[in-house]
Amino acid sequence: MEFNLKIWRQKNAKAKGHFETYHISGIEEDASFLEMLDILNEQLIREGSDPVAVERGCQSSGPVSFDHDCREGICGACSLYIDGRAHGPDDHVTTCQLFMRHFKNGATITVEPWRSAAFPVIKDLVVDRGAFDKILQAGGFISVRTGSAQDANNILIPHDKAEESMDAAACVGCGACVATCKNGSAMLFVAARVSSLALLPQGRPEAKRRAKAMVAKMDELGFGNCTNTRACELECPKGISVAHIARLNREFLSAKFSD
Amino acid sequence: MSDTKLISKIPEGPLEQKWSKRKSEIHLVSPNNKRKLEIIVVGTGLGGASAAASLGELGYNVKIFCISDSPRRAHSIAAQGGINAAKNYQNDNDSVYRLFYDTIKGGDYRSREANVYRLAEVSAAIIDQCVAQGIPFAREYGGYLANRSFGGVQVSRTFYARGQTGQQLLLGAYASLNKEIANGSVKSYPRHEMLDLVVVNGEAKGIIARNLVTGQLERFGAHAVVIATGGYGNTYFLSTNAMNSNGSAAMQCYRKGAFFANPCFAQIHPTCIPVHGDQQCKLTLMSESLRNDGRIWVPKKLEDVKRLRNHEVKASQIPEEDRDYYLERRYPAFGNLVPRDVASRAAKERCDAGFGVNETGKAVFLDFSDAIKRLGHQRVAERYGNLFEMYEKITASSPWEEPMMIYPAIHYTMGGIWVDYDLQTTIPGLYAIGEANFSDHGGNRLGASALMQGLADGYFVLPITIGDYLSHKFAEPKTDVSVKEFTQAEKAVQARIDRLFAIKGTVPVDVIHKKLGNIMWEYVGMARDAEGLKKAIKEIKELKEYFYENVYVPGSQFEFNQELEKALRLEDFFEIGMLMAYDALNRNESCGGHFRIESQTEEGEAKRDDANYMYVAAWEYKGEGTEPELHKEPLDYQFIEVKTRNYKD
């Protein structure tokens, strides 16, 4: 297969970015999207190292930087906005699980980084998602010391509650929800953590403090407000439901009322 | 006689009292003195995150480093199946002793009794800790924790959170880490890569790291350094490891004097999705649990193989009598449930004989048609539905209609930095935990035990044992990073980087890494012999020379530069590859994941040689281009009887 790739290039956080277009051919339809980018990078590295190509006016900005790691949909590192959709045209996958057979041969594919004020671009398609860590540091934990836990079966959790908690805990922290939201809100991300812990008895003692602290930190870091468009749920690679946002709102309001 | 440089510090006394005894001997550090002490933890997977969080809770000042944008991306996150613990919640007569015994036996009698017993002993507390952190483990309808069984054992002791157990355990450790970061006891350095260990007066005192965003080299000092950077499976280029997993931190420690143990023990997992062409860079694991109901086969006739490869016939059209269920044929007692190493070698044997079922000749079938007939669609879907879906996403072929195609791939490395009972390396003040050390899995790791070991080391072992060393250090001032050892280390790293940019060749790093992978897979893969291993050493040396003449590293140091990161890691992969080959050459026995063609029975089964090789091979670095020196730590089994593994009857 062959494609025209229109890719966002940006040298660093301060530089102005622009699109560059590359042609790539000989791609197997079973190749993943990131493997296709690996092949493009090999091509760009070879061009950049070729003095003849450089002399002929090859103006490549070098290989394209993009975050990736596990390549099996669980680490949450990959973060590409492809043809206007977070993680591309396939549903409920991360970019690393997107395969070229989902594209039409000869298509022009536009690739951008996550766009959000809270996720500044580091280089090309790589953004800084440190804000997510900061939100979790504000309260996304249970304050238990190593060694102080009671026997695990002393805490009984009904099967369905554990499953519901797990649904929320499946969040991989990729940031697709923020990139998709027209307001750049991190509500689905925050809700996933708050809800997962709020559903469990272990999470109750700190539930109020947690909901307030995480929401306050999210606001402070420049994420937008939630206006219930539900776009985040649609693009979440793990299919995390906006029902968790409803639970976050309940937790938050009840915490505020008890102030 | 034990090597004088390898003092394992195994406590005297009965097995079940060793850990208690050691704990009672360890000196304590008072809370006011803990505040004066600094610890560097490199790596944020299960081992690193749990250790850093626990050390922070104790009151130490911790700095934690990871190469990703967040500690949560560490590759522990990808572990699917579960975590073992000797809880005996199923009343199936499980015990600490049984978990200990299964792990030693599964490791083919090449791990330390005392370490493995301690691992089993603390396993139950891990589950308690994780539940308290809010990890949503699978539950029974009564609200109690659920268990499942895993390969190589006869009890149900595996705890799980769907197929995402590693993710949930890591998010638990990461949450505890976040709690300590918020507290101010841990400072986090994401997108920082350790590039050298700094040793002052024979003791580990800090690291040189590259800020991966700015490209600056930075110096960090401490009273002790903990390496928790995982395994070195990516030496093979293609593996189930994450793309950025690497063995560089371990190699830096090795070059600074830490011994490296049993490098040749690498685990090859039998059920991975086969390589689909030369554009691939990563292999995906399909859970071991599939072998409970799937039947593995290849055609009996070579003409059927040819027709399959030409797409003239589908697997499902090949009649029953023309199929060779080779595991059931060779190992009637265990059939498709033989251990990972045995299943992997058998697949290779059939493919080498020309029976591989895909275009590359490197695939066998894993067939569920009998299971679907026997159990019905719904029950198969309950057990494996998500795995079938994942397989179909990747391959565009449905396991409901046609058998899966699978092939073995590198998955985990049992070898690692040599550590004593306290998890301290041969360099005082330097510790290694989790997959980065060697101590618990011997020649082969059992399923669901990697998570257990990472968390055992990080939550319950290291935070205690490191106190013994630090109890003598609290009077020492903070490490001064302007001393000559730091300056020299930084200069050496700078020289390495300058050298790479100066080559100005034409070949991308990955192209050369692929070549290394081919050499490793061919000669240091599933079947090894002396001739091939010598060839591997020679070819790796040549490839290294080729690299230093032809690699092209684009861009510059002082920017986000993924090609530079890869080039630096590949330099270390050459070193590890060579070390693996030396170790494999020395160990002329077949043991666990290490199969020497010269050491097999008449039926072609692995033949262990306890008389000559019942030891840990610990290698000492002797300078670039020089053969490393072998030190032996004899393995003395006092508490269990050493037996031969048999899966035939």
Image: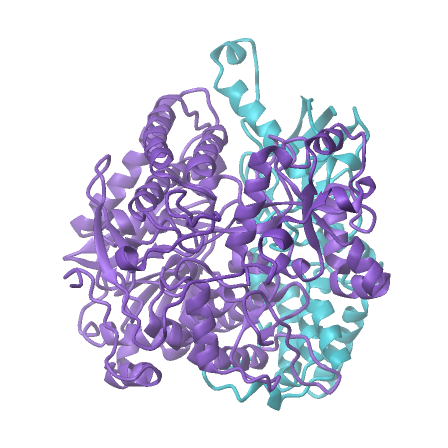
Chain colours: A cyan, B purple
Q: Quadrant of residue A108?
A: top right
Q: In the rendered image of this protein, does residue A15 appear above or below residue A21?
A: below
Q: Residue at x 66, y 43 (%)?
A: B364
> For this rendering, which residue is in front, A59 or B534?
B534
Whether residue A227 is visible here, answered yes or no, is no
In the drawing, does residue B115 fall left or right of residue A156? left
- For the N terminus of chain B, the image quarter is bottom left
Whether residue A88 is visible here, answered yes or no, is yes
Across and down, in percent, residue A27 comes to 69, 27
Q: Residue at x 82, y 30 (%)?
A: A104
Q: Residue at x 54, y 78 (%)?
A: B127
Q: Residue at x 47, y 34 (%)?
A: B563
For this orientation, the residue located farthest to the front is: B602
Number of marks drawn: 0
- For the C terminus of chain B, the image quarter is bottom right
Across and down, in percent, residue B454 comes to 45, 66
> For this rendering, which residue is in front, A90 or B636?
B636
Q: In the rendered image of this protein, does residue B406 appear above or below residue B56?
A: above
In the drawing, does residue A18 fall left or right of residue B573? right
Q: In the rendered image of this protein, does residue B320 appear above or below residue B80?
A: above
Across and down, in percent, residue B328 comes to 64, 55
Across and down, in percent, residue B513 comes to 46, 33
